[in-house]
Amino acid sequence: MLCDSLEKVQPCGEPRPFDLRVPLVGFRGETMSFQVAALWEADAALAGSARIRVEVDTPTDLDACISSVELVPVEYPAPPGAEAGYLQTRPGLYPDLLMPASERGVTAAVGQWRAFWIDLIVEPFAAPLAGAVPVRVYGGDQIIAELSIPVLVVGATLPELEIPNTHWFHCDGLANYYGFEVFGDEHWAAIDHFLGAARGISANTILTPVWTPPLDTAVDHYRTATQLIVITDVGQDEYVFDFTALRRWMERCRAHGFQYLEIAHLFTQWGAKATPAIHVQTDAGLERRFGWHVAATDPRYRRFLEQMIPELRTLLTTEWGLENVFFHISDEPTPEDFDGYAAARAVVSDLLEGCTIVDAISDFGLYKRGVVPEPVAATDHAAAFFDAGVRPWLYYCVAQDTNVSNRFIALPSPRNRVIGAQLFKFEARGFLHWGFNFYNAAKSLTTIDPFTDTCANRAFPGGDPFLVYPGPGGQPLPSIRYRVFAEAMGDLRAMQVVRDHHGAARVRKIIDPDGSLALDAFPNDAVHYRRVFHQLALAVQEFTEA
């Protein structure tokens, strides 16, 4: 049967069929996705030899890319006592990984539902289209089903997102998984592929490892060093800085269309107590000059920053645009961390005068104390900010596990898709997620194989650490969650167009007709989101065809 992109086809239990009353909708240069689910009920004696494949007859201006939806292990699908909104709360195998399907198709699993994921890629100058796309399903060499999916292609191009959208990029994960030399040619090639994948979910902001980001790292432990700036100690606490690799990074980011850079945090996570791991070239070799062993307020760090930050600012001003750069002090401070965070910020406040500093916080009281003027609020704590007239960025991660949007593997896809409408309704200033490709265990105590460990060594709900898998040759493989988040950002970009031509009230009427949409209350009906996107597309057509 046909299924839409918001269905997660599980081996046991019949999936929800595609609602043919709402067509598949795409804009120029975008991707629209659906699935073909199949249950092989033949004699079990054929197990291991029966193969299923799918063919799609694409019209002009559309290309089809067919993947097999693969099951991945999820040891920690949901927190204890999880609310009823999860697909399941038991450890097991869940559909997530999208693997390119071979021309021979895939081996059937007798008595189990399995799915093909079909991406229809719309050419950049595609003509408008309203029609149907034929789909054939083969069992072996025999056609076992002939299907047809309704399609609407809009003759318009969606704009870029108006707000920053970042999913933290972890260069060490690529070096560790593939065994590449850090910033060697193979590593750079993989970075380039993964940067391109990040752009596929409308990410326009990239975490930049001027030094190794001090994120999710246990005290006195260090991640694999990925430091773009080469720093040389020339004596008497004097440093020389080589920005060659940083310039290469910026060139690749610019080529992919990123608008904003995020500079790695200036202090350690959870309290800003120490300095990040910063390596320095000396006559005796490479030395970890700063790290857990150097306090945040150590005068040596201040003297270093007095030399480094002005040079970094000059480079960013002339070669990127300082107005498009975000700095961070420390991630996720709590009220108990106020004194330490404030002290760390004071170390750099004059050096970063005029710069934009953003940090993730969950406590509105901490914001009111003035140390985080540009907050990134967790979705389950953001209501206090909005109620006070503050427009924060939004983020979610491992802790946002109850009654709010998120993209865990065990959550139904509408919980992933709704974030686009929420960002628009609440006029959030940006979106942040910590894990685009985090392939470490929790606190980076060891590395993981993301194909066998989706939970960072049973620490986080499955899928929280990453959206893409490391495929062969340094090429990323997408997940269902990746594709659905891209759709959520497509929703938001379409909302921008309709707002600009018809007004925000028209958008609100489409996405939230009864005014009930909230950060913790939203439709769980998958067809609702497809219907909303269809209505947005029709609204765009009104002026494109006028």
Image (cartoon, rainbow, N blue to C red):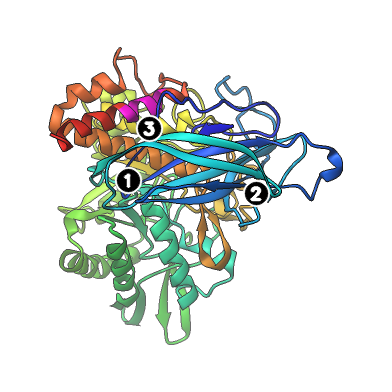
Q: Is residue 480 left or right of residue 60?
A: right
Q: Which residues are magenta?
A: 528-534
Residue at the far right: name it.
45
Badge 1 is on which residue? Answer: 165
Q: Earlier in the sequence, mark 1 or mark 2?
A: 1
Q: Quadrant of residue 517?
A: top left
> At which x and y percent is residue 430?
29, 40
Q: CA distance from mark 2 to mark 3?
A: 26 Å
Amino acid on which the number 3 mark rests in the picture: Ile
Please tell me whether mark 2 sits on a helix, a strand or a loop: loop
Query: Callout 3: helix, strand or loop?
Result: helix
Residue depicted at 24% across the width and 70% down the height: 307
Main secondary-structure element of the magenta-colored stretch:
helix
Other residues around mark 2 within 10 Å, as few (<14) / some (14–19) / many (≥20): many
Which callout, 2 or 3, points at the residue further toward the start of the chain?
A: 3
Q: Nearer the viewer, residue 81 or 157?
A: 157
Residue for badge 2? 453
| Residue type marked 2 | Asp
- Sequence order check: which comes first, mark 3 or mark 1? 1
Packing grade of label 1 (10 A; few <14, some 14-19, many >=20) is: many
Mark 3 — residue?
Answer: 419
Tally of numbered tags: 3
2 and 3 marks in contact (CB < 8 Å): no
